[in-house]
Amino acid sequence: MAKLNELPAWKPAAGNGDYSAGPAYVPAPENAPRANVPKGRVETFQIPLVGSKFFPPGAGGRGRGAPADGAATNAPTREVNVYVPAGYVPGTPAPLLICHDAMGMHDTPPAPYLPTILDNMIADKRLPPMVVVMLMHGGQSQRSFEYDTVSGKFAEFVEAEVLPVVAEKMSVTFTKDPNGRATLGGSSGGAAALSMAWFHPELYRRVLVFSGTFVALRTDPETAPHGAWEFHENFIPKTTPIKPLRIWLHVSDKDNGANSSDASMRNWVLANLHMAEVLKAKGYPYQFIYAKEAGHNERPFRAQSLAPALEWLWQDYRPATK
């Protein structure tokens, strides 16, 4: 691997391309609450899974055709956490961020608490005021079925069965401009984040991924014989013209499967290095961070990098004009 530019902390000059970070990690200052900053509203509620046209209870297993885990997947509801920025005026179309695994909501320190980062960066006008939906997966082993399936199904589920409920309960309106809609996730949630935008760029065009599971975890002989490995093996390099996506991604040197062969299609390090290579070759706007002395989706790295990653992801955003 070629030597990468160091990216110890966010700096305005850091743009597209490949960077490295670590081996020491320091939480970004945006993680700390500030007394003089207006606070957004955060609410948690449940939405029913029973009757879902996309992911009813017990709909899937752990991958590779494994059956569901019975009662473990039969939870009747799904947790939804919603952040509404301070000063939001009902009826105003707001930018949207979807977070898989409710990332940024329930993690323990040193992992960052996303609402605090948003409060600080929105107040500093470094991020647009956005509504954030931090969504949990279905019961336990249903997570792989939802996240590792390489299709547009999860984006369709969110659009049809999640956002209408959020809009009603929270009195918010989401922008229809896909440039104002982003997805975020780690591990399999990162693969889901890319799938949402890849298969539905008319809905989402910004993607942020930690330790993305771009490996052959859940395959389909017709549409994705190598699972999410297809993104860097076939989908991205063979799709012309390029899709209108902006992608931030990361992997750690000690990530999952680091000692596995390329042929196994189960090495997260190689998978994400391949992702960076094909994104660069195709001319996508992307930023890739290689974290040294770190493991899979580790909290210290996220504590340092989430705020600058969000700033990079949204830095070219301009609200659509009528």
Image (spheres, helix red, strand yellow):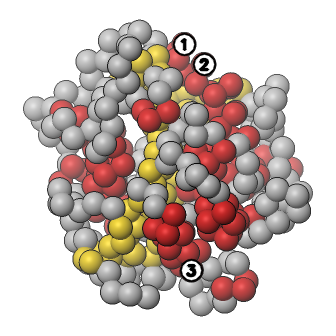
Q: Quadrant where the C terminus lies?
A: top left
Q: Say if mark 3 contacts mark 1, CB within 8 Å.
A: no
Q: Secondary structure at mark 2?
A: helix
Which one is nearer the viewer's eye here, 172 or 275? 275
Residue 302, located in which quarter of the rendered image?
Answer: bottom left
The CA distance from mark 3 to mark 1 is 43 Å
- The residue tagged with tag 3: helix, strand or loop? helix
Q: Which residue is mark 1?
A: 168
Q: Find disc 2 in the rendering and name its residue.
A: 164
Residue drawn at (39%, 75%) of the image: 290
Callout 1 environment at 10 Å: few (<14), some (14 to 19), or many (20+)? few
Q: Secondary structure at mark 1?
A: helix
Residue sitting nearer the eye, 108 or 288: 288
Residue 12 can be seen, yes or no? yes
**Alpha-carbon span between mark 3 and mark 2:** 39 Å
Q: Residue at x 62, y 80 (%)?
A: 267
Foreground label between 3 and 2:
3
Residue 305 placed where, x, y %? 31, 60
Name the spot of residue 238 as percent of width and height, x first.
66, 63
Q: Which residue is mark 3?
A: 270
Q: Amino acid at mark 3?
A: Leu
Q: Nearer the viewer, residue 85 or 308?
A: 308
Q: Earlier in the sequence, mark 3 or mark 1?
A: 1
Distance of label 1 from label 2 (alpha carbons): 6 Å
Amino acid under disc 2: Pro
Q: Are marks 1 and 2 in contact (CB under 8 Å)?
A: yes
Amino acid type, mark 1: Glu
